[in-house]
Image (cartoon, coloured by chain):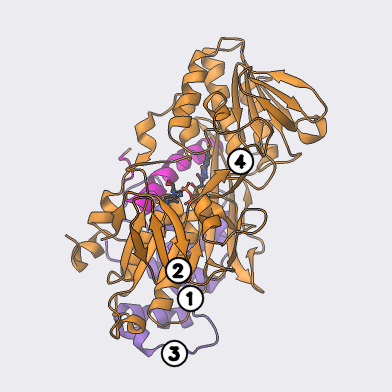
Amino acid sequence: MITRRNLLAGLGAAALAPAIAAPALAKGKGAARVVVVGGGFGGATAAKYIKVRAPEINVTLIEPSPRFYTCPFSNLYLAGLRDFETIGHGYDELKKVYGVKVVRDFAQEVDPAAKTVKLKSGEKLSYDKLVLSPGIDFNWNGLQGYDEAASLLAPHSWKAGDQTRLLRKQLEALDDGGVFILVAPADPYRCPPGPYERAGLIASYLKAKKPKSKILILDSKDAFSKQGLFLAGWKQEYGDLIEWVPLSKDGKVVKVDAKSLTVETEFGTTHKAGVLNVIPPQKAGLIAERAGVTNKAGWVPIKPETFESQQVADIHVVGDATIAAPMPKSGFCANAQGKVAAAAIVASLQGRTTPNPSWVNTCYSLIGPEYGITVAGVYKVADGKIISVDGSGGVSPAAAAPDFRKREALYANAWYQAITNDTWGTALRA
Amino acid sequence: MRYLGLIAGLMAGGMFFACTQPTLAQAETDVSVLAGTCTNCHGSNKNWKGVIPGLAGRPEPILLGLLKSYKAGDPNATVMSRIARGYSEDDLQAIANYYSKIKK
Ligand SMILES: Cc1cc2nc3c(=O)[nH]c(=O)nc-3n(C[C@H](O)[C@H](O)[C@H](O)COP(=O)(O)OP(=O)(O)OC[C@H]3O[C@@H](n4cnc5c(N)ncnc54)[C@H](O)[C@@H]3O)c2cc1C
């Protein structure tokens, strides 16, 4: 049972947010209805924080999976440093503590004129405000030869779940002396430092278990997030185990043959892998396209103050699906955007002015289990655009002592525990 | 110090919002939005016990002192100095006040 009292008891900061009647909707219309599509970092956070701010609003979260497995820390699982279930989170607290109605289904259509969402089951839900946080989908065949069938042989593991387990199995079966090839995409894509964290953590596994093996990163770009720190860290921890081939050195893969585990680059070089991990080009999750909120490139332009779609009224989109640069496509940002959208939606339903938005991002990456690095940013809106606040943010110092790296690794773990608790309320007790 | 007024309003309960003008041209700075992002690392449960400490109910002068020293470039900080530099002194004051008012 949700009562005002136990709701507050479960909360920290947000407990201060007042719960008041909704003047804009109270008059004869009944409680306002918000439908949230997607129970990942952005959607679960938005659903929870709408309830925190205004328990009287009806919030329904649509999510097909009973449990959400996070991409953050999936690289630790791949390296054999975590059990799979430690990256899984359920929806019980959202239901029981916060009073979110969770519907296990898949949203198939949005009718923005009628303000309804049609689910796979055939059920139709009406909304006053809709939040979409569907994450990414892949541009199958955007990279020649790489489609859904190919992903069963050469997994992307860029959505956590079966794909992550498959890649782990393949790594376990890799011969000592085999080559792990990681194909990294051009910008923009989910989690800019993700491929490089993956390479480092898999290197820690190979170094310990299969020291004759190699990692080859074939990259469609010439620069990447925290590049200097990654390159220096890899060298220090793994010597020549990891080789990074940038765009300008013929790193761009143009064709994949998943059956033979070979890839072909722009200038015709072929590489054969023992394990092939292809991170393909991406776009906003399909439901965003169905709702008519995507642009030609497949991403969602938003109004920065509220994360409402620029194209369709009363549909707010948060997380990886959006164009929110300079904010990266990270779980941290999806959560932060979910909170800003929640505040804006509640204000609008209560007939109040939109509060000024404010966001932070910190992306922790591990080079090894005790070697962490970060990039951070503080963001605000100026002249109708999201900007990094002057003088804020940046990466970990290049010349930090081992103790500093160790503390950042420790904080990476603490961050994971806190953000998963903030999002789903189910952080693991360490 | 517009934040402090806001906080006082929040503390007084829902009445605060009844007094705001929906017609204001300028968006209000709502300290709960400003401070909301901290919980991604510091936890949102009141009695959060993590390696990164919880903030709720810690004395305002202590929180403010820490935030100011991060902003000044505390060499012991890892990421907090890079974050604190993104806020004005008034922002930091508002955030410290906000968290200190939440009872543990
Ligand atoms: C290897 C890797 C490591 C990463 N590490 C980090 C990290 O350390 N820190 C960090 O901050 N970020 C990290 N990220 C990025 C992070 O995973 C994403 O930025 C984050 O998940 C985005 O949140 P989201 O809400 O947009 O999408 P998601 O979290 O992917 O959630 C989308 C949800 O929507 C559901 N959904 C989609 N379509 C529908 C539909 N039509 N109907 C109903 N439900 C639907 C899906 O089932 C899913 O549950 C990492 C990513 C990868 C790949």
Q: Disc 1 on helix, strand or loop?
A: loop
Protein chain holding label 3: B
Q: Rounded to the nearest whole Å, what is the CA distance between mark 2 and mark 3?
A: 19 Å
Query: Residue A371, how many percent across, how many down?
Result: 54, 33
Mark sitting on residue A355: 1
Q: How crowded is mark 1: few (under 14 residues within 10 Å), some or many (20 or more)?
A: many
Identity of the amino acid at label 2?
Answer: Val
Identity of the amino acid at label 3?
Answer: Gln
**As drawn, A125 above or below A422:** below
Residue bearing the label numbered 2: B33
Identity of the amino acid at label 1?
Answer: Pro
- Do circles 1 and 4 both sit on a common chain? yes
In the figure, the shade used to draw chain B is purple
Mark sitting on residue A193: 4
Q: How many marks?
A: 4
Q: How crowded is mark 4: few (under 14 residues within 10 Å), some or many (20 or more)?
A: many
Q: Rounded to the nearest whole Å, what is the CA distance between mark 3 and mark 1?
A: 12 Å
Protein chain holding label 2: B
Circles 2 and 1: CB atoms closer than 8 Å = yes
- Do circles 4 and 3 both sit on a common chain? no
Residue drawn at x 34%, y 78% as measured from the top left: B10
Closer to us: B64 or A253? A253
Q: Tell me which label, 2 or 3, sits earlier in the chain.
A: 3
Closer to us: A397 or B40? B40
Residue bearing the label numbered 3: B21
Identity of the amino acid at label 4?
Answer: Pro
Q: Rounded to the nearest whole Å, what is the CA distance between mark 4 and mark 3?
A: 44 Å
Which region shows up in magenta?
A: A405-429
Q: Is residue A321 visible?
A: yes
